[in-house]
Image (spheres, rainbow, N blue to C red):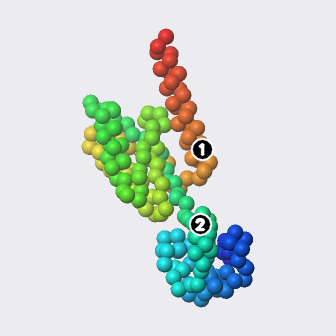
Amino acid sequence: RAKTVHSILRHVAETCGVALEHLYTTIAWPLDKKYGESYEAFRRSVSEPGIFDGLDIAEDVMASMMLNIKRRLTPQPIKVRADIEVRCFSYEGIDAIREALLAGQACSTDSVDIKVKLIAPPLYVMLTQSLSKEAALEAVNAAIDATRAVIESKGGKLAVKIAPRVTTQREESDLRRTLAGVAEEENEDDSDGDE
């Protein structure tokens, strides 16, 4: 954390032509006294611009510092994924599945947008991104419950193959490859039907 603060201040000092020690005495050390550590103040400044009020900071230094802070300390959204299997052999069939999956997507909120992607019938993936891990997991679980309620009312079944979890970059790239492979197979099937 101290390295991050030092790196930001060093970069600002180089770009603005200000002495690094001057930035420490006017910015970092006063923030350490006020917030316990300047890293925490820098992190909070992304969402609370008033953090630097009362400090004697030149306009160009402030602009350069905020640019660096936003680039380095803006939280990255996490991705949550759940693999589900949805089946319905009743009269409504595919319409019941579509209605159930749309009910799951309707659980989206302003901060958590839930998407449902088809892997291969009956396997679907529920995906979302959020800054809050708990909110994302809660939203995907609510979407699964809503989907289950609708599909079971229509005589179908929902099975959770892989419970909601935070995904890694590797899992995301594997999912993209799988989805691309499914789309490619569909295109090949379509071209075979034309002949």
Residue in the picture at 69% in, 83% down: 22
Q: Position of residue 42 (x, y in %)?
A: 58, 75
Q: How many numbered marks are there?
A: 2
Check the picture and name the quadrant holding the N terminus.
Answer: bottom right
- The quadrant holding residue 178 is top right
Q: Is residue 17 left or right of residue 84?
A: right
State which tag comes first along the sequence, 2 or 1: 2
Nearer to us in this view, 142 or 41: 41
Q: Is residue 163 visible?
A: no
Q: Amino acid at mark 2?
A: Leu
The answer to whether 11 appears left or right of 173 in the picture is right
Viewer-closest of 187 and 166: 187
Residue drawn where x is 61% and y is 87% of the image: 30
Residue that mark 1 sits on: 173
Left or right: residue 11 compared with residue 177? right
Q: Residue furthest top?
A: 195
The residue at which mark 2 appears reads as 67
Residue 56, position in %: x, y? Answer: 58, 84
Label 2 and label 1: CA atoms lie apart by 30 Å
Instruction: Tell me if residue 60 comes above or below residue 121 in the rendering.
Output: below
Label 1 residue SS = helix
Q: From what the image shows, is residue 175 above or below residue 3? A: above
| Residue 190 image label | none
Q: Position of residue 135 (x, y in %)?
A: 43, 62
Say left or right for 83 vs 148. right
As helix, strand or loop, the secondary structure at mark 2 comes to helix
Task: Tell me if mark 2 has few (under 14), some (14-19) or many (20+) residues whose alpha carbon lies within 10 angstroms of its own.
Answer: some
Q: For the residue marked with disc 1, what is the amino acid? A: Ser
**Image point (56%, 32%), residue name:** 181
Closest to the observer, 114 or 158: 114
